[in-house]
Amino acid sequence: MHSLTFLPFLTAGVIASLGATSDNYRDYEWSYHPDPTADEYLDHGSKVPSVAAAVTKVVEESSYVVKLDCLGCPFRVRALEGEYFMGEPDNSLLLNFTIGEDRHSLELNNKRILPLEIPTKVFAFQTPANLTSDVLGLMVNMQMLDESFNVGTKYGRFELSYEHIATLAEPRVEVLRFDVTNIDITSSTNPGTYELSKAGQKAVEIKISQDSWEEGLKIQSVELVDRDQAIPHGKMACGKDAPISDVKFRSTEWDYYGQQGTFARSFWVVWDESLEFFIGSIPLMVVLTTFAGALALVRRRQLMQMELAKTQNEFYMVDEEEGLLEEVDEEKEGEFNVKHSDV
């Protein structure tokens, strides 16, 4: 097992919450100012701090930080002026393995990885390989390894691709091997990718036990192992070999809609674009509907007026016919009276 240290300065309250962040920006200067060199420490009469161990215990059986050397990885750092540049010094990825609040899951940098659901995108900060234990302690205390940390830092943040192998090591003990295979930056600032393929690249192996459901999971051990080292493989209660789950996740193959090249992703892309078109067309549809409704009302009113005019014309025609009939009747009555008077 690689060297392991414990952060003794964490109080009980800090352990429960991984620390409360400060409102004073000066408390974060370590996260964006250049790291002092060993000579600068000596010039100021200070002791050169020790380098953080490969595995640091934060909370017994619950939380560990792994400083995984990223062999050959380009080093991404931000200068005080805000510009990023890529260098080549030895560097590491910080991986915080923690038992979840439900006590029945394992999280990596606040993302659940056991049980694993795909896609699970995990991000990790990159630091110099000689990161000091003091700075690592500040990172943990101020929740830099937690998603709640929202202060800009000089440290680059990478999206991880990984191989996730899990099986039963022995009764009530599960073993997980987490192997980072690629790191990616997909943002507009210095986008790029790197494959961790150099000889000697390590993987993280974690053993987790559970004596009872009420007690929950406990981390038994965390160590760095060779990639080609055989994973511990136990047997089930029935005597058969325990099944092995081996999942390879390539982060760049997945986006908001799903995995590239699949029918499901194509369906959701079409669905979302159609929905977006429909929602974007609502104002136009409202205008057209209002216009069509107004035309219908005008036309209806015209028809009603035409119908009213037609009714009035018919009424007048009936009136005139009745008037003519009355005149004819009067003439006939006059002729009749004349004839009778002659007699």
Image (cartoon, grey):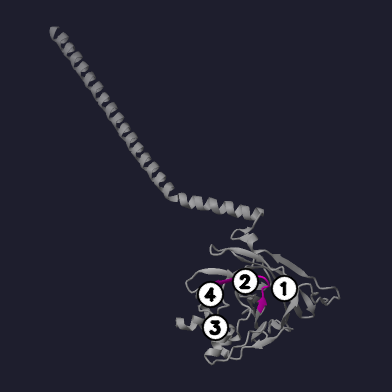
Q: Where is residue 147 in the image (x, y as percent from the top left)?
A: 55, 74
In the figure, is residue 324 to the left or right of 154? left
Alpha carbons under labels 4 and 3: distance apart: 14 Å
Q: Residue 36 carries which label?
A: 3
Q: Distance between the residues labelled 2 and 1?
A: 16 Å
Would you identify the image quadrant in which residue 137 lies? bottom right
**Residues at marks 1 and 4, CA–CA distance in whole angstroms:** 25 Å
Of labels 4 and 2, the one closer to you? 2
Of callouts 3 and 2, the N-terminal one: 3
Residue holding disc 2: 88
Tell me if residue 263 is in the magenta stretch: no
Q: Nearer the viewer, residue 307 or 201?
A: 201
Q: Give the range drawn in magenta.
A: 67-77
Which secondary structure, mark 2?
A: loop
Sequence-first disc among 1 and 4: 4
* Magenta stretch: includes residue 68: yes
Q: What element carries label 4?
A: loop
Label 3 and label 2: CA atoms lie apart by: 18 Å
Q: Which mark is residue 201?
A: 1
Tell me the residue that label 4 is attached to. 154
Looking at the image, do the residues carrying marks 2 and 1 touch, with CB atoms under 8 Å apart?
no
Give the Cα separation between the discs numbered 1 and 3: 28 Å
Q: Residue 173 appears at what percent x and percent y?
A: 76, 80
The image shows residue 59, relative to residue 286, as above or below, that is below
- Residue drawn 48% across the image and 70% down it: 82
Tell me the quarter of the image containing the C terminus: top left
**Residue drawn 67% across the image and 54% down it:** 262
